[in-house]
Image (cartoon, grey):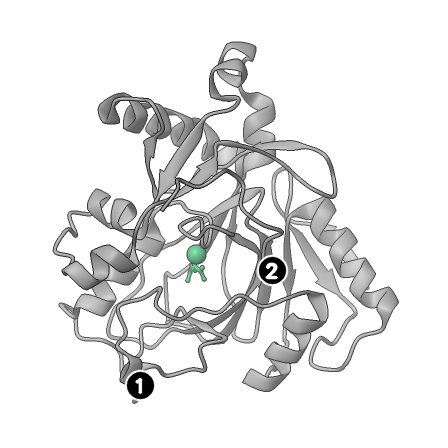
Amino acid sequence: MEIRQVGPCFAGEVSGIDLTQPLSTGEIGAIHAGMDEYAVLVFHDQRFTDDQQLAFSRSLGELEEAIGTSLRAANEYRLPTTFADVSNLDQNNKPFAHDDRRRLFAIGNRLWHSDSSFKVTPAKYSILHARSIPSKGGNTEFADMRAAYDSFDQETKEMIEGLVCEHSQMYSRRLLGFTDFSAEEQARFQPVRQSLVRTHPSTGRKSVYLSSHAGDILGWPRPEALSLLRDLTELATQREFVYSHEWRQYDLVIWDNRRTMHRARPFPSEEPRDMRRTTLRGEGPTAEQAAA
Ligand code: OGA
Ligand code: MN
């Protein structure tokens, strides 16, 4: 297995490994080491079935379930709930209509975010496989939150140290003008708390934990909180920190949500884009939660 850096300060392209087959302990160790070094790894031509993608993902760690995180009703799932269905397809594999609420909700993925930052225990790795891709557009961009943190001046680092944000999928959608949540949805999307600065458990390096799901900073007036989060996001997503991935069919991309953000780019909505994500659970909460 070899890794060639493809991004500005992170992101590697891996060759010489077939992830559809069971991996040795050494190969699994090499993938984790590669993730610690590059934070985003790209593997081409991995012809996974769902079961193979699940088996590969489980060989790297414990899975997070994706139930209740989209607007699909229980009978509208296309994939097992061990997958986050990042496609634009309904349960009959047809692209959602242009004004379908499920499609509009998924447009939230076009905002810079870190996966499952709206969960008490947020995600570790996301493992995204391209089963089919549109004729144009649909890149996924990644930004290095460790390099971003390192670039902040001392005053900024001191100001953000110890701050705790509240994250909810309603906050990211509010940024897009999507606000008509039912009472059931409001209950399901209750905000959770996340530290704004995180220390990576294996590298010991700090990064800024931003996400468009962040919509409040504890103890701060909301306009001031949102303006700081916007400033930090602007700084952290300058092109010098960004790798843009242009998908080929059967690419597998793994990213570390603890030290990167990512966003989807637009594509023709009538074309199928079948992307299937498995997600590994993080180690635990990043901040103390409010008493219920
Ligand atoms: C995701 C995601 C972006 C994309 O899978 O978590 O945000 O380009 N995907 O589909
Ligand atoms: Mn995502």
Residue located 40% across and 68% down the image: 86
Asked whether mark 2 and ligand 1 are closer than 8 Å, the reply comes as: no
Q: Of label 1 and label 2, which has the lower sequence position?
A: 1
- Relative placement, left or right, of 97 versus 127 is left
85 and 194: which is toward the camera: 194
User: Residue 66's spot in the image, x, y percent?
Assistant: 44, 68
Quarter holding ligand 2? bottom left
In-front residue for pair 217/112: 217
Residue 254: image tag: 2
Cα–Cα span, label 1 and label 2: 25 Å
**Identity of the residue drawn at 26% across and 68% down:** 71
SS for dot 2? strand
Q: In the rendering, at what x and y percent does residue 76 appear?
A: 28, 82
> Identity of the amino acid at label 1?
Gln
Q: Residue furthest top?
A: 155
Residue at 12 percent of width and 55 percent of height: 180
In the rendered structure, find residue 91 and report the number of the disc placed on it: 1
Does 5 appear above or below 148? below
- Is the residue marked by circle 1 packed among few (<14), some (14-19), or many (20+) residues within 10 Å? few
> Percent position (x, y) of residue 226?
29, 29
Residue 47 point in image, percent of width and height = 61, 82
Left or right: where does residue 207 sit relative to residue 221?
right
Element at badge 1?
loop
Residue contact between numbered discs 1 and 2, judged by CB atoms under 8 Å: no
Which amino acid type is marked by label 2? Ile
Residue toward you, 107 or 45: 107
Q: Is residue 30 visible?
A: yes
